[in-house]
Image (tube, rainbow, N blue to C red):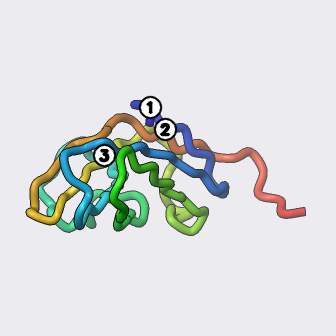
Amino acid sequence: MANKILYTRGTTYKLTHTYTAPTYLGVTLLFTVKNAKYDSDVTDVTNSIMTPKTLSMSGSTFPQTTTITINPSDIADTVVPATYYYSLKVIDSSGAEYKCDSGTFVLEGITTNRLA
């Protein structure tokens, strides 16, 4: 993944992440987008501008590639187009955390709301 994600409101966006790490058993991928670069909320609800994504990974070979899908309904229409912050981390079965990626998440508005 890049350190900048450009997302246009109302679209479906797929992020592909390839994971190479010391373990694969019980691995959980966490993807969060917030309006604050840092906070202490372990639930990722405070400051979140979209539905946090939690993906379980399984398999016995590396690297593993996972797709994170951002759907139009994941970001409320009331969220103002702006630059936000994302992070992607992995938690293994022992609870160890691995930071995989982080950076800016640019939410772009659209010029028209016409459906057809």
Where does label 3 land, which residue?
87
From the image, state whether disc 1 or disc 2 is nearer to you. 1
Which residue does the numbered mark 1 point to in the structure image?
Answer: 2
Q: CA distance from mark 1 to mark 2?
A: 7 Å
Q: Which picture quadrant has residue 1?
A: top left
Q: Which mark is residue 76?
A: none
Q: Earlier in the sequence, mark 3 or mark 1?
A: 1
Query: Along the horizontal axis of the image, is 26 left or right of 102?
Result: left
Q: Quadrant of the C terminus?
A: bottom right
Q: Amino acid at mark 1?
A: Ala
Of residue 104 and residue 18, the one placed in the foreground of this image is 18
Q: Residue at x 18, y 59 (%)?
A: 92
Against 51, residue 66 (above or below) is above
At a point 34% along the width and 42% down the height, the residue shown is 85
Residue ID for mark 2: 5
Query: What SS does tag 2 mark?
Result: strand
Badge 3 crowding class, 10 Å Cα cut-off, few under 14, some 14 to 19, many 20 or more, is some
| Residue 25: image location, x then y, percent | 23, 63
Q: Are marks 1 and 2 in contact (CB under 8 Å)?
A: yes
Amino acid residing under circle 3: Ser
Confirm whether residue 77 shows in the render: yes
Report how far apart the C-alphas of labels 3 and 1 lie in the structure. Answer: 11 Å
Q: Residue furthest front?
A: 60
- The answer to whether residue 54 is seen in the rendering is no
Dot 1 surroundings within 10 Å: few (below 14), some, or many (20 or more)? few
Q: Hey, which residue is sitting farthest right in the picture?
A: 116
Q: Secondary structure at mark 3?
A: strand
Q: Are marks 3 and 2 in contact (CB under 8 Å)?
A: no
> Mark 1: which secondary structure?
loop
Q: Amino acid at mark 2?
A: Ile
